[in-house]
Image (tube, rainbow, N blue to C red):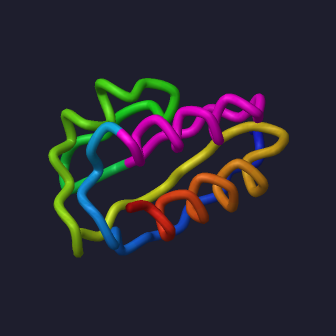
């Protein structure tokens, strides 16, 4: 079984194009598979369009989940991007 990591994040801004693009860039630097979950839906962190389709508003709590050798680092990087999203 590959290592995994998960953390909840409260969004300071809606998950629109700019923060979604920043998430994609952060996730792309890792080999881990990263996923963002909002309610019953999820989207791969490497797809800005799918991330925006989650329709996560400012103040919503999303969960960042990753599987793979560098899962912890991927979750930390994506979480930081989401926490500072504008």
Q: Relative to 52, say whether 57 is above or below.
A: below
Residue 52, by quadrant, is top left
Taking depth in this image into account, of 59 and 86 the one nearest to the observer is: 86
Q: Quadrant of the N terminus?
A: top right
The image position of residue 27, as x and y in percent, is: 63, 37
Taking depth in this image into account, of 26 and 6 the one nearest to the observer is: 26
The image position of residue 48, as x and y in percent, is: 38, 29
Residue 29, by quadrant, is top right
Viewed as shown, does residue 56 lie left or right of 30? Answer: left
Viewed as shown, does residue 16 lie left or right of 35? Answer: left
The image position of residue 25, as x and y in percent, is: 61, 34
Determine the residue positioned at 76% across, 34% down.
30
Q: Relative to 80, say whether 64 is above or below.
A: above
Determine the residue positioned at 29% across, 65% down.
13
Taking depth in this image into account, of 34 and 82 the one nearest to the observer is: 82
Viewed as shown, does residue 20 lie left or right of 64? Answer: left
Determine the residue positioned at 44% across, 70% down.
8
Taking depth in this image into account, of 1 and 85 the one nearest to the observer is: 85
Q: Quadrant of the C terminus?
A: bottom left
Q: Relative to 47, say whether 39 is above or below.
A: below
Magenta-tinted stretch: 18-36
Determine the residue positioned at 30% across, 24% down.
49
Question: Is residue 84 within the magenta segment?
Answer: no
Q: Relative to 81, say whether 50 is above or below.
A: above
């Amino acid at each position: 079984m590959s290592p995994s990591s998960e953390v909840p994040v409260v969004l300071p801004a809606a998950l629109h194009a700019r923060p979604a693009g920043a998430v994609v860039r952060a996730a792309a630097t890792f080999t881990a598979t990263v996923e963002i979950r909002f309610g019953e839906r999820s989207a791969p962190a490497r797809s800005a369009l799918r991330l925006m389709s989650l329709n996560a508003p400012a103040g919503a709590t999303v969960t960042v989940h990753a599987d793979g050798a560098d899962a912890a680092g991927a979750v930390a990087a994506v979480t930081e991007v989401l926490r500072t999203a504008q």
